[in-house]
């Protein structure tokens, strides 16, 4: 039996919810990284606490790996149903490692004494450490590195449990090592890198760290997968960074708390998914009328209604764009990399503060649940830009200005009265039904768009701005498309990644017109960004590569689709 890849190795772990697959994933990521190997990990899981079948993919390589591949080199099946569940991702060269107690038979099946070794250590609870040991044994990773990570991971457990986990890992390691030494499995040889300054984080953590760097000091949310990781992270570190974290009773309360916090001078955020944002839309409209800043993170999942609550899709762009009654400006950011998520999440607070509009950070389940190693994030280039004024006695909260931005005061800072009302109002903030003034106020709010567009995030052209064919994408498809283009190795084809999806940067129309052929890649059924591009630029992208299965695009899927299009 041989590995199917020389550049990287794809390991997939599959078992029932509650079997501890995430424990194995977390440990292996730390161990591989400490051994100098680049890692990428993502997961797909069913909407249940127990039962069902979940899987995690871990890619290991000497080079950077940051995208999901369909290819499976090694499947570690912790449940009999794993082969059936992942049959579309099992190829002729896939090695299936399965507990020897199972009756299953399959090509390239290697039976491993996982249950037996766990029982000898102290019970089936140690099966995960046995599995970790087997995989580490296949890669012949130094025992010292593995033990350091086990001790750190189980630091809050008593000494006996830590000792037994190390023992279980060692027994698994010996078995894994024997598979390589006997020639049963041939593993690729990877050159270790110096990754000592790297960190391993996921999309939810990158958004959270960006929020902290941007001065976020208040979060109010109702838990909703797949966005909950942001609420959990900011709550966990709330004392360390001076953040008020509130788990609201529902999404309506959450958005209104955040609006109130901004009114009082805080920098607030709410995190949710599409169904939760649907409840928040009245609050978004309120922020539009009050001209109160607000930052909302939407981690998309497939709808309508509850849809597939633990799967991924880019189906809520139009919801984010049109959610909230009435006409008022907003900004929508869709980061494609962890670094971009950090930078744009920090920037979101400055944009909200400066323009006094809702700023929406749009991610998805694939993005927030994907982990990989990156160099340490640096906040030195990020500045917290506050736009609050000290009010005077004659202060006018909604003063008519040429650029549409009125001076924003907060209660208690100065001598002026800071009025807020959801009805149409005059310059001081008092309710009005003066229809001429109504027109002036609408025009004032919409006038902000001119400067918002001027400040829009410029799209990225990769690898070159000299091209014939253009592949347009946005948000989480960034690394998948990038690796697909690397595979194709065509000098005439470039990726245009759009990280600010509204309002669009002014250069986009010119870039599209420059190409001989244009295709767009989106994880939805109707090409929502393509429709927005046509609405904004009059340029119609006819070739669409769409995916709405609930599972993210794979590198192979994009590679084949682009190759077919170019033919």
Image: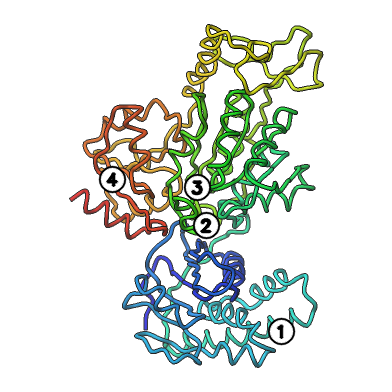
Cα distance between the residues tagged 1 and 2? 30 Å
Cα distance between the residues tagged 3 and 4? 22 Å
Q: Disc 1 on helix, strand or loop?
A: helix
Q: Residue shown at 56%/15% (left/top)?
A: 404
Q: Earlier in the sequence, mark 1 or mark 3?
A: 1
Q: Disc 2 on helix, strand or loop?
A: loop
Would you name the residue on which mark 1 appears?
Answer: 164
Q: Nearer the viewer, mark 1 or mark 4?
A: 4
| Viewer-nearest residue: 421 or 141 | 421
Q: Residue shown at 33%/44% (left/top)?
A: 526
Q: Earlier in the sequence, mark 1 or mark 4?
A: 1
Would you name the residue on which mark 2 appears?
Answer: 370
Would you name the residue on which mark 3 appears?
Answer: 337
Label ID, residue 544: 4
Q: How is the image coloured?
A: rainbow
Q: Position of residue 381 (x, y in %)?
A: 62, 35
Q: Residues within 10 Å of mark 2 (few under 14, many from 20)?
A: many
Q: Nearer the viewer, mark 4 or mark 2?
A: 4
- Is the residue under label 4 in contact with that under label 1 (CB below 8 Å)? no
Q: Hey, which residue is sitting farthest left in the picture?
A: 567
The number of numbered badges drawn on the structure is 4
Q: Position of residue 352 (x, y in %)?
A: 60, 29
Q: Disc 4 on helix, strand or loop?
A: strand
Q: Position of residue 525 (x, y in %)?
A: 34, 48
Q: Residue shown at 61%/66% (left/top)?
A: 30
């Amino acid at each position: 039996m041989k590995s199917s890849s020389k550049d990287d190795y794809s390991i997939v772990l599959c078992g029932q919810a509650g079997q501890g697959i995430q424990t194995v994933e977390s440990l292996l990521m730390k161990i591989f990284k400490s051994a100098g190997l680049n890692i990428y990990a993502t997961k797909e899981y069913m909407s249940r606490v127990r039962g069902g079948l979940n899987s995690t993919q871990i890619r290991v390589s000497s080079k950077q790996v940051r995208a999901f591949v369909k290819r499976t080199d090694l499947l570690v099946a912790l449940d009999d149903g794993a082969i059936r569940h992942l049959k579309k991702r099992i190829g002729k060269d896939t090695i299936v490692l399965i507990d020897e107690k199972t009756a299953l038979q399959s090509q390239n099946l290697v039976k491993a004494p996982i249950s037996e070794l766990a029982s000898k250590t102290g019970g089936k609870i140690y099966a995960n450490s046995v599995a970790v040991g087997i995989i580490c044994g296949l890669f012949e990773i130094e025992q010292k590195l593995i033990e350091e990570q086990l001790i750190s991971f189980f630091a809050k457990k008593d000494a006996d449990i830590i000792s037994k986990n190390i023992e279980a890992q060692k027994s698994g390691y010996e078995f894994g090592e024997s598979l390589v030494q006997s020639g049963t499995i041939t593993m690729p040889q990877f050159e270790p890198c110096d990754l000592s300054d790297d960190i391993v984080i996921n999309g939810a953590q990158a958004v959270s760290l960006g929020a902290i760097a941007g001065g976020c000091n208040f979060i109010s949310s109702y838990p909703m997968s797949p966005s909950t990781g942001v609420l959990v992270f900011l709550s966990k570190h709330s004392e360390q960074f001076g953040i008020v974290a509130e788990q609201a009773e529902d999404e309506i309360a959450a958005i209104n708390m955040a609006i109130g916090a901004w009114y009082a001078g805080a920098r607030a955020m709410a995190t949710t998914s599409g169904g939760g944002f649907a409840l928040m839309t009245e609050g978004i409209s309120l922020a539009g009328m009050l001209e109160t800043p607000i930052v909302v993170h939407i981690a998309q999942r497939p709808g309508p209604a509850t849809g597939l609550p633990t799967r991924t899709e880019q189906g809520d762009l139009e919801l984010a764009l049109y959610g909230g009654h009435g006409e008022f400006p907003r900004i929508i950011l869709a980061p494609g990399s962890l670094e971009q998520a950090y930078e744009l999440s920090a920037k979101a607070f400055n944009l909200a503060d400066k323009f006094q509009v809702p700023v929406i950070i749009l991610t998805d389940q694939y993005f927030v649940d994907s982990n990989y190693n990156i160099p340490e994030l640096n906040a030195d280039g990020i500045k917290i830009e506050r736009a609050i004024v000290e009010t005077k006695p004659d202060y006018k909260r909604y003063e008519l200005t040429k650029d549409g931005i009125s001076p924003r005061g907060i209660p208690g800072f100065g001598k002026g009265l800071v009025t807020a009302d959801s009805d149409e109002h005059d310059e001081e903030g008092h309710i009005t039904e003066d229809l001429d003034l109504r027109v002036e106020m609408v025009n004032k709010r919409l006038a902000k768009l001119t400067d918002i567009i001027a400040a829009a995030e410029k799209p990225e052209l990769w690898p070159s701005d000299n091209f014939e064919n253009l592949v347009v994408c946005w948000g989480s498809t960034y690394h998948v498309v990038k690796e697909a283009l690397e595979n194709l190795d065509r000098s005439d084809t470039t990726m245009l990644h759009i990280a600010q999806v509204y309002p669009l940067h002014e250069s986009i129309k010119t870039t599209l017109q420059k190409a001989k052929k244009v295709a767009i890649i989106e994880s939805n059924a109707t090409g929502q960004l393509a429709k927005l591009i046509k609405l904004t630029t009059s340029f119609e992208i006819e070739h669409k590569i769409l995916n709405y299965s609930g599972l993210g695009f794979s590198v192979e899927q994009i590679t084949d689709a682009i190759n077919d299009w170019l033919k």
